[in-house]
Image: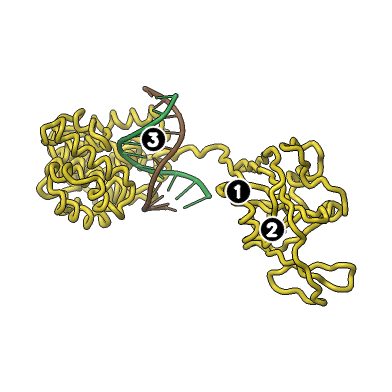
Chain colours: A yellow, B green, C brown
DNA sequence: AAATCGGGGCC
DNA sequence: GGCCCAGATTT
């Protein structure tokens, strides 16, 4: 036995005659946070500082910083008169120090251009360093109770879902739609609480992943929810089709003209194959000899650099910059039939072994000098084979790479 | 390892 | 005005 529930009896969240802001504010009345330090005595100055701090840090982290900052700099004038260094010392630990610097700069600007009064026109607020459209909207609405929209990351997510707006929010057209919607939904009444509420909703229930739609006051009006697409919206940033990774690829030649090969870790790129030593490109070329010494235990001398070549993987492009090094023969000694852990051993003329005092890099499973005849027999990745095997590689500086004959 | 974020800066 | 970055956290 069911009976029709009248609109009058329905919760605002389910009642289609309630607007977006009414539903949101009703939720905020029950669940919103109203006792954070910057929610008392809401002046433009206090809200401004809190908004800048909150741009980069979570509420719980911000609170103690905010309180210390406010004790030392209770108003714009004290902030403007302090040195940048002192302001930064109160910012230390929050990160993004450019924003701390902007804070000070803006305070000075307010003293000079606005007679020490924080501006109350949206465009003036937005003209201050470190304050863009969204932060200006937050200050104007929360502190000055002016009807002004905001569009921070949380609000973008709420609105993209609510209206099922397609496309990455970083695209201008999408951002324009969101700003327009943000503006349309912003109420004339209780705009301060509304701004707080929509940010809170995005920060809590309407989270990036697995939003808690069951508790959400907008559920009945949310387009993404109706379509079951709350996990797909907002559309993620299109991942750059071909991330490029660059690395040095080292041809380390010993006195016999052999090259150093390493057996790569079993997983990952070229898993388990022999290849030339590869070094991340964030080391500069001058650091390579030290790197070779510490990682491989070899004294290498730079000889030449070859033209970089590319290899396309399914998910990224690898650009390898070949460098030719020459090294002394590693110190060798006869050790009978035993080898020691971490030290490469290999047979020489069948009867005894020598240790070569070069090391195996972390993660790699073996490391050997091979002559051309030898490396032709082992499993090399095709691009490496191509690099070594043909004389066709365009070589800078006139020195051929690893194209020495057997020795 | 990659996505994210709001504003700045550069052309 | 459009594009990309700096600088840090989150996932």
Q: Position of residue A193 (x, y in %)?
A: 16, 43
Figure check: A67 above or below A399? below
Of callouts 1 and 3, which one flags the residue occurring earlier in the amino acid sequence? 3
The residue shown at (65%, 56%) is: A292
Discs 3 and 2 lie in a common subunit: yes
The x, y position of residue A283, in whole percent, is 57, 49
Q: Which residue is mark 3?
A: A169
Nearer the observer: mark 1 or 3; the answer is 1
Q: Which mark is residue A299?
A: 2
**Which quadrant of the structure image shows residue A202?**
top left
Residue A255: % across, % down: 80, 56
Specify whether A305 is left or right of A336.
Answer: left
Q: CA distance from mark 1 to mark 3?
A: 42 Å
Packing grade of label 1 (10 A; few <14, some 14-19, many >=20) is few
Q: Assign a secondary structure to mark 1.
A: helix
Estimate how packed mark 2 is, as few (under 14), some (14 to 19) or many (20 or more) residues with alpha carbons within 10 Å.
many
Question: Given the image, what chain letter belongs to the residue carrying mark 3?
Answer: A
């Amino acid at each position: 036995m069911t009976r029709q529930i009248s609109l009058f009896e329905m919760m605002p969240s389910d009642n289609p005659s309630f607007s977006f802001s009414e539903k949101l504010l009703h939720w905020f009345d029950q669940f919103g946070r109203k006792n954070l330090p910057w929610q008392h005595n809401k002046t433009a100055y206090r809200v401004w500082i809190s908004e800048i701090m909150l741009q980069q840090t979570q509420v719980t982290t911000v609170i103690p910083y905010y309180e210390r900052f406010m004790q030392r700099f209770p108003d714009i004038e004290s902030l403007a008169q302090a040195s940048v260094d002192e302001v930064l010392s109160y910012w230390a630990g929050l990160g993004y120090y450019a924003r701390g610097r902007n804070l000070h700069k803006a305070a000075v600007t307010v003293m000079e251009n606005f007679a020490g009064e924080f501006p109350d026109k949206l465009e003036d607020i937005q003209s201050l360093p470190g304050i863009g459209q969204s932060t200006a909207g937050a200050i104007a609405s929360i502190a000055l109770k002016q009807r002004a929209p905001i569009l921070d990351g949380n609000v973008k997510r709420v609105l993209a879902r609510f209206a099922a707006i397609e496309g990455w929010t970083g695209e201008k057209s999408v951002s324009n739609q969101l700003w327009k919607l943000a503006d349309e939904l912003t109420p004339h009444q209780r705009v301060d609480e509304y701004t707080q509420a929509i940010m809170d909703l995005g920060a809590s229930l309407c989270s990036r992943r697995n939003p808690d739609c069951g508790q959400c006051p907008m559920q009945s009006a949310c387009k993404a929810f109706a379509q079951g697409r709350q996990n797909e919206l907002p559309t993620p940033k299109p991942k750059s089709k071909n991330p490029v990774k660059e690395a040095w690829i080292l041809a380390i030649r010993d006195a016999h003209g052999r090259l150093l090969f390493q057996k790569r870790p079993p997983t990952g790129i070229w898993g388990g194959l022999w290849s030339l030593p590869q070094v991340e490109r964030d080391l500069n070329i001058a650091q390579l000899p030290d790197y070779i010494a510490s990682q491989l235990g070899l004294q290498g001398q730079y000889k030449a650099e070859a033209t970089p070549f590319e290899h396309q993987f399914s998910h990224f492009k690898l650009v390898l910059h070949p460098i030719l090094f020459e090294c002394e023969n590693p110190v060798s000694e006869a050790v009978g039939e035993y080898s020691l852990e971490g030290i490469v051993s290999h047979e020489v003329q069948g009867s005894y072994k020598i240790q070569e005092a070069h090391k195996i890099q972390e993660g790699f499973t073996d490391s050997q000098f091979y002559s051309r005849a030898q490396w032709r027999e082992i499993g090399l990745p095709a691009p490496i084979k191509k690099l070594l095997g043909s004389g066709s590689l365009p070589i800078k500086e006139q020195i051929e790479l690893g194209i020495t004959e057997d020795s």
